[in-house]
């Protein structure tokens, strides 16, 4: 009896080992996957792409390697056109932010989200009004009052790119408060934060993850978050404040809100099996402790979706951006 049980145990173990070794999907990458970032280094998109790459390596979620490549030319158009033109290539994916909508609308460059294959929304990113901590402004009301006292075009607002989400939000802020800034565009959110620390600009509307290090060090001060509700994260970032302690801009009398997509797309013309592989891969990424820690550190809205839900969201968001950019006068001619 003991010998029979031992034999059955050995057979079961061998069968299990073959089951583990067998491919989980009908398709898997057969060479290195190029992960395109349509923005500069150091910004939120770049940080998230490199985190995803690191999680995949750390947890051995993919057999082949993943290489992050920054293609920021033309406000991200370089990266998007590269993926659009890689029709049928399953070894090229791209992380998207709201320049997925703003760049074609502002430049007339011939691409849109339907020219690629939507994979997954990974999260939604917030925007915070930041000032240098050495300035006297303790809240958004004090800052707005100072801008009004100084007069139009006396304060500089730093942001990522021209006619992109940061400038769209700046225009919305101006309309809501009766102010007027000199908008100064930079290549990435990391550079924007550095410029504010150096007092080369007066304020920014940077994402949380792009300025959290400078906030923690005491160099920058958050005044308000551009959303309907406060961020839920209550762990202290500084000795005295958590993300949840930052009031909404609406609470501060500035009725302006805006959230940004952090999503993944792949080239057009790929197969359902190839799409399914990446949907599952990114789901596994989101389930790791590393990802959850990053979500809290960067104060992200953790909404995630794929398939028909994601496509519906994209359709609505594209229409909203067209409205916002029309109001701001940012549309390219004949759009």
Image (cartoon, rainbow, N blue to C red):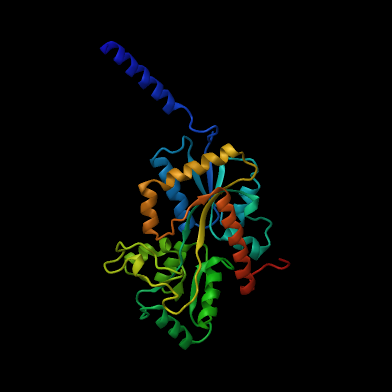
- The extreme bottom residue here reads 149
Q: Nearer the viewer, residue 130 or 20?
A: 20
> Residue 303's x, y, as percent?
46, 56
How many circles with numbers are drawn on the protein?
Answer: 0
Image position of 75 (left or right of 283): right
Tell me: residue 61, above or below residue 231. Answer: above
Q: Residue at left 57%, top 66%?
A: 164
Q: Residue at left 58%, top 40%?
A: 90
Name the quarter where the C terminus is drawn: bottom right
| Residue 75 seen in the current view | no
| Residue 258 seen in the current view | yes
> Residue 189's x, y, as percent?
47, 63
Q: Residue at left 49%, top 56%?
A: 45
Name the quarter where the N terminus is drawn: top left
Tell me: residue 312, above or below residue 135. Answer: above
- The extreme right residue here reads 334
Tell me: residue 14, above or below residue 63. Answer: above
Q: State which quadrant residue 190 falls in.
A: bottom left
> Residue 77's x, y, as percent?
61, 57
- The extreme front residue here reads 1
Q: Nearer the viewer, residue 209 or 150?
A: 209
> Residue 177's x, y, as percent?
50, 81
Q: State which quadrant residue 245 falls in.
A: bottom left
Image position of 312 (left or right of 136): right
């Amino acid at each position: 009896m003991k010998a029979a049980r031992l034999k059955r145990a050995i057979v079961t173990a061998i069968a299990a080992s073959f089951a583990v070794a067998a491919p989980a999907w009908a398709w898997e990458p057969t060479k290195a996957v190029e992960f395109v970032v349509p923005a500069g280094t150091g910004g939120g998109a770049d940080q998230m792409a490199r985190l995803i790459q690191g999680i995949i390596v750390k947890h051995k979620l993919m057999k082949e390697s993943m290489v992050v490549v920054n293609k920021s030319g033309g406000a991200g158009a370089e990266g998007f056109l590269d993926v659009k033109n890689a029709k049928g290539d399953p070894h090229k994916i791209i992380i998207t932010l709201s320049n997925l909508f703003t760049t074609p609308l502002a430049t007339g460059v011939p691409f849109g989200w339907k020219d690629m294959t939507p994979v997954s929304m990974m999260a939604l990113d917030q925007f915070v009004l930041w000032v240098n901590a050495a300035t006297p402004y303790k809240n958004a009301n004090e800052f707005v009052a100072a801008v009004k006292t100084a007069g139009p075009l006396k304060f500089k607002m730093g942001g990522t790119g021209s006619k992109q989400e940061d400038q769209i939000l700046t225009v919305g802020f101006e309309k809501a408060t009766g102010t007027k800034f000199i908008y100064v565009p930079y290549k990435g959110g990391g550079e924007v934060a550095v410029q504010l620390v150096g007092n080369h600009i007066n304020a920014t509307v940077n994402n949380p993850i792009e300025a959290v290090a400078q906030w923690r060090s005491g160099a920058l001060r958050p005044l308000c978050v551009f959303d309907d509700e406060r961020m839920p994260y209550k762990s202290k970032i500084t000795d005295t404040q958590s993300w949840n302690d930052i009031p909404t801009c609406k609470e501060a009398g500035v009725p302006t809100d805006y959230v940004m997509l952090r999503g993944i797309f792949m080239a057009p013309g790929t197969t359902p099996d190839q799409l399914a592989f990446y949907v599952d891969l990114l789901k596994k990424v989101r389930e790791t402790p590393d990802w959850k820690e990053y979500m809290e550190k960067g104060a992200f809205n953790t909404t995630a979706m794929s398939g028909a839900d994601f496509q519906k969201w994209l359709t609505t968001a594209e229409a909203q951006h067209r409205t916002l950019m029309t109001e701001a006068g940012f549309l390219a001619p004949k759009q």
